[in-house]
Image (cartoon, rainbow, N blue to C red):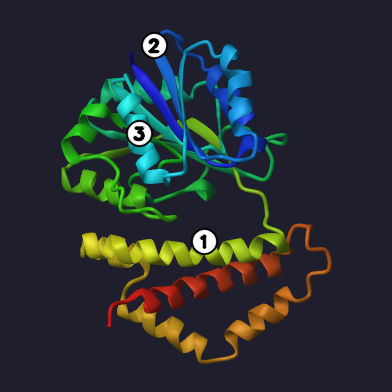
Amino acid sequence: MDLTVQLSTYNRAHLLGRVLEALFAQDYDPQRYEIVLINDGSSDGTHDLIERLRPQAPCRFDVVHQENVGLAKGRNIGIARATGEIILFIDDDILSTPVLVREHMAMHAEHPRAIVRGAVLNVESFDELPPPIWTIKNYSGNYFWTSNVSLPRALLDEVGLFNESFSEYGWEDLEIGLRLRHAGVPSLFNPRAVVYHHKPRPTAHDIAGMVRQARAQARTARQFRALNSHWRVALATGQTAPHTLLHRALRGTRYTRTLLTALGTVQDVSAPLSLLQLAAARALAREAYFEELERSTPR
């Protein structure tokens, strides 16, 4: 088997059908790629959706239905089921273009010991897609980002799998990416390996979830730094003296109350936030992140 597409899903039945149909429609010999899907304890009808779509798969389609164990452990279960020489990771809110598998395989043919990162275009809806053309506004400096990244399975055997101590949101892909970087594995970018990332503008209903996710990400950031004290980790996670001092000072002002005031102007809680409200919501989540970082810091 040339390549395994590995993804995990949790309560995304409203997107997963389109995600799978795009993977079924790859411009690549279906006998030479497979899909390994981990249904990580979904409770929204995902199980029935998968089983309904299973007969449509032109390639090998291996599904694991399990209790919720978190993304890192779910990824490792998927890797254990994979038979491809190359493993391509995507997420359950990613819509693949038909050339995705072919473009990843083409670059690995030229660079057999490398990470291949594809292009990720953020969209608010899978029904209104821009042309699949990467531009600098879609730039990401991540070395290893599981929205659209592939590597030889042999490299995972060499550096180890995802660290399962990351049970909450965030950093598990950057942590394995750092191990790959330290092993001297280059990370190459293929702008033709395009996917669309479903990223609708949040509503007022989403703000509490944004804050919860930010706090979880802060706790896993502390784990990441405890595992590796490299300066890249400190900088990426904001665990530096300037970051700490700045956000501690902001909390001592009316800054947070100003953000809450801006969000208090929302009239329709189900409507997308305005640009000003969105900026305020993101800032509020960012301050929650840094507050949780300090709270999680050993005294």
Q: Secondary structure at mark 2?
A: loop
Toward the viewer: 183 or 50?
50
Q: Position of residue 111 (x, y in %)?
A: 25, 27
Res 204 → quadrant = bottom right
Q: Which residue is mark 2?
A: 32
Task: Name the residue rendered at 39%, 39% in the picture.
Answer: 74
Locate residue 2: give its quadrant.
top left
Q: Nearer the viewer, mark 3 or mark 2?
A: 3
Q: Which residue in the structure is indicated by mark 1?
A: 213
| Nearer to the camera, 227 or 109 | 227
Q: Is residue 40 above or below residue 274?
A: above
| Residue, disc 3 | 77
Question: Within 10 Å of the Cα at label 3, are there few (<14), some (14-19), or many (20+) other Cα atoms?
Answer: some
How far across and down, in percent of the image, does residue 132 sit? Answer: 58, 32
Would residue 32 appear left or right of 121 to someone viewing this image?
left
Kind of residue at badge 1: Gln
141 vs 280, nearest the viewer: 280
Q: Nearer the viewer, mark 1 or mark 3?
A: 3
The residue drawn where x is 35% and y is 80% is 242
Image position, residue 116 (x, y; %): 34, 34
The residue type indicated by label 2 comes to Arg
